[in-house]
Amino acid sequence: MCSPRTIQTLRHSSRRFTTACGAQAGIKWRTENGLARSGTEYGPMTDLPDWSFADGRPAPPLKGQLRRKQERGTLARRVVNLSLEVDKGMEVWREKQEEAERMQERNKSLLLKPKGNLLLKKNK
């Protein structure tokens, strides 16, 4: 249990104590409006330079901008590679299905055929 002195100190403190997570604030609103979960993931505040030269030339990219650009390029290449793998897998699966159908038709054609009187009865 806290002593009365501790409670009095906490009461007069200028800092507020909260149990809510500040990083979670506004995530629902941001995602509903098509924005990033936080203001530091992507967007003009992180992607555009902070300043430019007086004659209109853009500022050189910062280290963080270069790093994010490289990460996005790596992610894009990975997505393309995974998509190609899925397409290739679907093609192999289709070929296996067609081969199974061909084998089934071949097995049907190899079955014994009716002959003689049985053939005549079947045609009628």
Image (tube, rainbow, N blue to C red):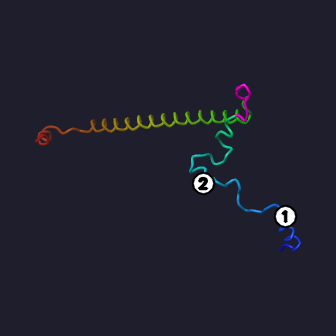
Range of residues picked out in magenta: 49-59
Secondary structure of the residue carrying numbered label 2: helix
For label 1, the residue is 13
Secondary structure of the residue carrying numbered label 1: loop
**Viewer-nearest residue: 121 or 95:** 95
Q: Which mark is residue 116?
A: none
**Viewer-nearest residue: 25 or 103:** 25
Rendered residue at 63%/36% (across/down): 72
Q: State the CA–CA distance, disc 2 to disc 1.
A: 32 Å
What residue occupies the far front of the structure in this picture?
54
Residue 36 position in % (x across, y down)? 62, 46
Rendered residue at 39%/38% (across/down): 97
The overriding secondary structure of the stretch rendered in magenta is loop
State the count of labels: 2
**Viewer-nearest residue: 66 or 46:** 46
Residue 34 position in % (x across, y down)? 57, 46
Q: Quadrant of residue 66?
A: top right
Q: Quadrant of residue 50?
A: top right
Identify whether 13 is placed above or below 42: below
Locate residue 111 relative to residue 76 in the image: left or right.
left
Q: Quadrant of residue 98?
A: top left
Locate residue 29 relative to residue 11 in the image: left or right.
left
Residue 4 position in % (x across, y down)? 87, 74
Q: Looking at the figure, which quarter contains the N terminus?
A: bottom right
Residue 32 part of the magenta segment: no
For label 2, the residue is 28
What residue occupies the far right of the structure in this picture?
5
Rendered residue at 68%/40% (across/down): 45
Q: Residues within 10 Å of mark 1 (few under 14, many from 20)?
A: few
Q: Amino acid at mark 1?
A: Ser
